[in-house]
Amino acid sequence: MTPATSTAAPHGTFEAADPHDAKKKFLHDAAEHVRDEGHRAFVRKALGGYYASRDTQKARYRDWEHARDAASLAKWSAVNRLDELLPKFVANFERNGGRVHWARNAEEARDIVLGLLRAAKAKAVIKSKCMTSEEIHLNAAMEKDGYGVVESDLGEFIQQLRGEPPYHFVFPCMHVRRDEISDLFGKHLGTPPTDSPEELTMIARRHMRRLYVDADVGITGANFLVAETGQISITENEGNARLTAALPRVHIAISGIEKVVEHLDDLAVLLPMLATAGAGQPMTCYNTLYAGPRQPGECDGPAEMHLVLLDNSRTALLADPEQRDALHCIRCGACLNVCPIFKNVGGFTYGTTYQGPIGSVITPHLRGLADWNHLSGASSLCGACTDACPVRIDIHHHLLHNRRNAAKSAPSRLERLGHKVFVMVASRPWLFALGGAVFRKTLWLVKKLRPPLLRDWLATRDLPPAPAASFRSQWRRRS
Amino acid sequence: MTTAQPGSARDTILARVREALRVPAPLPHMKSHAAEEAAPAGPASLTILPVEFARPWLPDGGDTPEACLAILTENLGKLKAVVHRAADPTAAAAFVADLARDRGWQRVAWHGHALVEPVATALPCAAERIDAGAFDKNALETCDAGITACEALVAQTGSILVSSATCGGRALSILPHVHIVVATLEQIVGTLGEALEDVRARHAGRIPSMVSFITGPSRTGDIERILVLGAHGPKELFVVLVG
């Protein structure tokens, strides 16, 4: 999504030009962000209110921890029976009058949507928040083909005007200050400056209303696909998805294949937990189930409804039973909100569609472990993400699994040599003692010379003073 | 497995899914044993639905009609929706008519429903009836308020369940600046599960093309995470409870 009006990014770029440079970009942008105290304080403050409301809402559950079991079970039983439930969903969705289009990868998905826009002779397209469309870079493809598209979610609209992708996949513009938004609206919409979030929201509201009525195609995402009824479920707060699926003549939804749940009742567990975990709400404002286009006897709604089902390497993740539960993700964003790494390096540093801990788990599967394994290291392994996950994805262990897999598939010679030397030394007590003695005597030299191998590590850390004697000799003296 | 196979994208993806699932995944780490007992031999053996497990763990929706009403009223209040109790349809109509006068509404949209009709016909301003058949969405966009019935009111979350089949279609409850819901006390249910169950039973043959849980007036926190009501949908939500 890069409209003509792109503005300079505050920190580096959003995606490395060459995917092989993803690691270099990450390290560079992380270093810059960590130094930006103002940015970090702003993000911390924005999340402060979330922690409070999340805890209030969690307290309303009679047992949140057990409820997580049920939510996890609902997704586990669906993901592990995708072979049965996906065709069942599709059959029911089509019986309701909708049409399903299958896309193996991003390119096929883009071609399907562009084909549908051509067939609909679309002039104006309105879009509500849809992360799968970010994943397949749909807006850029639509603009290249001459289709104007407006993001209607307030945060996405602001990001579209700024020429930036979402900073956080639930709160797209949480890094942007109100004065920047006021300037942005002044520049693009000609509105007078204001420092009131209320007034800024009303500017977007007024700007968007006619666009819903005039659009001939509406594009949305989907949060859940209900197999037994053939409905798709969309969760949102603003009402923009409701309007997008109500007024245009054609409704196109884009969803990953992993969004299937078996029962309609599963949503009675998943919808409130999604809202509480992700945004500290009892329920998101609008949770809407769509079963195809307008039916006979109904007074409005689109004449056509299309659903694009996207694989894009999800089946590769499905084929890994150890990490298959990463497909349970309901994209609530709770793991980002609690992650010390996310809070300090910021959303753009990841250079991925899905940021934060869950993004660091799934991106190497979706886009290749060789180029994206550095994200496995973007974790302190504190486990806050795993604790926060409403569907109990074992996020921080999966980051470890990815590290292990990367070491297996492309072992670092230097690391291997290091481990060999360590094993040799540690398994010979006399050599270990000798090594310790030498190290105690030469530590000052290491500090002074800063050898290249340790330079990065020493740049942000101080070595402790060398002890006078080894632990073993101190122990002997004690007894 | 990722090499190109003959056949459609559908066949390729489903073949990949089948292939991927040949190795089973373990049960997720859980706190309870009940869940492990639910599916002793893998996901296909799941007999007890997650919602049945979760019922005693989710937020309380109340056991008696009185308790449900109290929880519903409290939740709607926290969501910044306005609840008004009306003794009968006449009192409900009087409340909405006063509202229309106070706000100086010019046009209000409504749909043909036994609960909505007496309210709409008592309005002191123009009233646009929206029913089966085409209506002008441009006209609806200029309406000050929309009045609808609902399928159910959910105490547990303070949600209002509307559907395209019984609540005036898709746009009436989302496009006008104010949404007024007229409902009876009998329509209150305890939990989201019961509401979904009801809607399925009521539309056994054909589920409406849209079923929506509305939980408070439209809102956003996209600017500095500060709550603002009325992002794109209604800025205000009134629930008129008759009975």
Image (cartoon, rainbow, N blue to C red):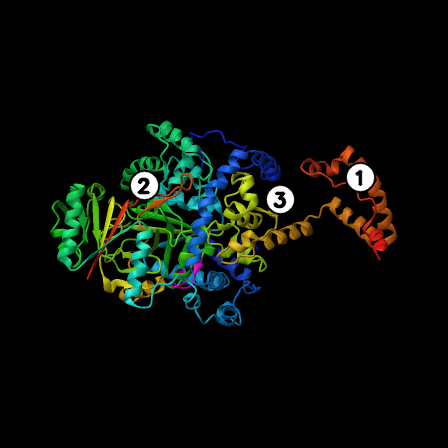
C-alpha distance separating marks 1 and 3: 30 Å
Q: Amino acid at mark 2?
A: Lys
C-alpha distance separating marks 3 and 2: 44 Å
| Coordinates of residue A256 in the picture (x, y in percent) | 46, 52
Q: Which residue is mark 3?
A: A374
Q: Amino acid at mark 3?
A: His
Label number found at residue A443: 1
Q: Quadrant of residue A231?
A: bottom left
Residue B3 appears in view: no
Stretch in magenta? A260-267
Q: Quadrant of residue B104?
A: top left
Report helix, strand or loop for mark 1: helix
Chain letter behind tag 2: A
**Comparing labels 1 and 3, the label whose residue is closer to the camera:** 1
Is label 1 in contact with label 3 (beta carbons under 8 Å)? no
The number of callouts visible is 3
Q: Amino acid at mark 1?
A: Leu
Say if labels 2 and 1 share a chain.
Answer: yes
Q: Residue at x 59, y 36 (%)?
A: A25
Chain letter behind tag 1: A
Residue A320 appears in view: yes
| Coordinates of residue A67 in the picture (x, y in percent) | 46, 62
Q: Residues within 10 Å of mark 3 (few under 14, many from 20)?
A: many
* Sequence order check, earlier mark of 2 and 1: 2
